Amino acid sequence: MKAIIDTINILLPIFYFVTFGFYFYDFMKGGKKFVNSKRLFLFLTLLVHFCYLLFRTIYFDHPPITNVFEIFTILAFAISFSYFILELLTDIRGTGPFIIIISIFFQIISSFFIQDVFQVKEVLRNHLLGIHVFSALVGYSAFAISSVYGLLYLILYKQIKLNKFGLIFDRLPSLEVLERLSFISAVIGFFLTSIAITIGIIWLPKAFPKFSYADPKLIGTFLVWLLYGFGILSKVFGKWQGKKIVIFSIVGFLIAILSTIMSNFLALSFHSFY
Amino acid sequence: MNIIAISINHKTAPVEIREAVHLTDDEIRNLTQKIKNELLNEGLIITTCNRTEVYGIPLQQNISHQDIEKSLLNFKLVSGLNSEHFQYFTASSAIKHLFSLATGIDSLLIGDNQIFKQVKDSFQTAEELNFTGFLMKRIFDSAVKAGRRAITETAISEGAVTVSYAAVQLIEKIFSNLNKKSALVIGAGETGEIAAKHLRERGIGNLTITNRTFERAQNLAADLSAAILPFEKFKESLYKFDIVLSATSSEGLILTKADVAAAMKKRNYNSLVLMDIAIPRDIDPESKNIDYVFYNDIDSLNIIVQQNLSKRIEEIPKVEKIIEEELNSFLSWFNSLEVTPAIKSLRDYFETIRIEEVEKNKNRFSAEDQEKLDIITKRIINKILHQPTVELKKFAESGINSDEAAEKISIIKELFGLNKKDEKEK
């Protein structure tokens, strides 16, 4: 099984790159040459990636969440998986290159630096922790996708305002659609982080003797969750829309990243495992 | 192939001549009856705002383009119209021209797929008047196939190439679903009417018309099932609309930045699209500096039009390739009509000689050998004719010019005296 894991580890960046190639070609050419095959290839890539994560879990006897590079491969998977679901739900297929490129970035780093870790803290073998981390990562991936759509919204908004009718104008969906995609992604992200937080609140105090509600990672995540919750409610009740809501999504994601970096690398937390 | 065609189009005649030559539906029917009896065996008349064309198979060999032209001139009596305004096409060039027409590459607006529908309608009229025979039907089928392929296999008809369509294209880059949007069209003149129709076609949720002359607004509103707003009051209601399309002949601005700003405040800064397609402009261009206001005038819409036209021009070589393929396919079918009887005549000719010679000499052979003689001579004839048969079939399949194919066939017929034989049989 080790040989299979190592082979897939090398192949995954190639798979993501080819998938990106299909999406990028269609975006640039504006044709429909790969309209179905690109989705199929994305599905295959995700399937291979899922098997890789499963094999790692079985072979190393712990979910792949024990170090940064394992987290990166899950992030690569989660981002493309979230995009895949969004594409299936909305049938908007033109924005793939902007999302899949993020997966390529995380997967390349992971493939280069990932190590075989057999000895891990006992708590990291817990399956509830696996669900907690996985839902948090997919949730954050959805926030990332939301901010990408937000960014695309701002670019298209600017282009239309300046009467620049180039490739972006031709290929991207309408501003309303981009705003909706950004919002749906934010809602999915909010829902999944809610699950992660709920599991955390119930299970973490039991699992960690040093558990503290004042933990910086907990506070950071909770603040991000509150921020998105506030943004979603503002949109739902009709107060916020357009540029305002997408900027909020981008800022929310930047705060989420900043909070993760600060709590992981700068502050001492019971949440740090590596 | 003896198909001929004449054409007056935007390349050959000014608009006033094209307008004058344009045929109404009744005129097409009358002209068809006239030329059907006097000049053409079967044919097709196509008339649009930019062209009038007549295609047909002459009743006699000596009937020329000039005869059809004369017939049209006598029918329409247009002053200033002369031979210089006509283009003539013969045989495969006539078919190629029809294919170019159906695919939209010969249109004033390249890739205009209205012409595809007009060609189909013209053929339907010709069919109703029993003006189409098996050849015209086949030509029409091939033209339709070429037209369809151009639309599906290339981007020749993609993108807006008129200002009013470009306005709609731009609106669709801002709003995803026009069903839920309200539009106000200011001005019920020709431009306003076209824009309003486009919006209606794209499924706009609510359409309202306002115009200085209330009756004109009423007429247009009735045509498009739209609401009417008195011109004096439209500014008060501006905030209710997501799209405002202005096309009046007003000399000054009818909407200032302050008007737009006030409306935006009232609509809680929901996106507002302002399309100013009037000359001089109706809406203050400074309005574009207000957040969520998407202001466009003729110049900015023309950028879209020019870009789309350039893209369509880039597609022309692909369409020409399709035309070439369809023309070859048609010609190989047509050539096979001539080649198959030629092969048969050639084989019959050799078979007759063989039978005659076998009959003459069979008594020199024993009864057993007579049967062998028959088989051997048949085999010899088949071997001799194998190569010419294959070559003749190749002419047909290669889709070379039908005149060239006819010439080669006539050489073979002449060499073996097949023409005389055919005439005798007739």
Image (cartoon, coloured by chain):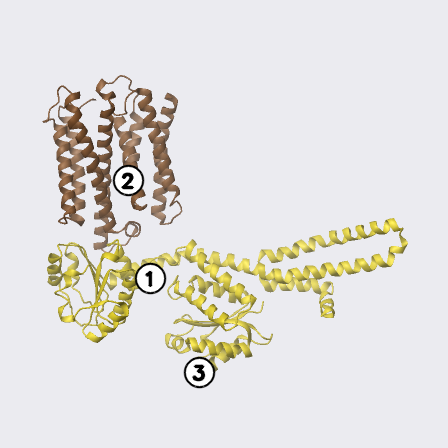
Chain colours: A brown, B yellow
Name the residue nearer the viewer: B109 or B33: B33
- Residue B77 is labelled as 3
Q: From this view, report whether residue A32 is shown above or below residue B346.
A: above
* Rendered location of residue B4, percent (x, y): 53, 71
Nearer to us in this view, B163 or B271? B271
Residue A71, x across and y down, in percent: 25, 28
The chain containing the residue under callout 3 comes to B
Mark 3 residue crowding within 10 angstroms, few (<14) / some (14–19) / many (20+): few
- Which quadrant, please, contains the C terminus of chain B? bottom right
Residue at image location 23% in from the left, 25% down from the top: A128
- Measured in 3D between alpha carbons, the distance from the residue under mark 3 to the one under mark 1, in whole angstroms, is 34 Å
Neighbours of disc 2 within 10 Å: few (<14), some (14-19), many (20+): many
- Evaluate whether label 3 is on the same chain as label 2: no
Give x and y (percent) for residue B342: 68, 61
User: Which amino acid, mark 2?
Assistant: Ile
Q: Residue furthest top?
A: A119
Instruction: Quickly name the residue at label 1.
Output: B161
**Chain of the residue under label 2:** A
Q: Amino acid at mark 3?
A: Leu
Q: Earlier in the sequence, mark 3 or mark 1?
A: 3
Read off the residue under disc 2.
Answer: A99
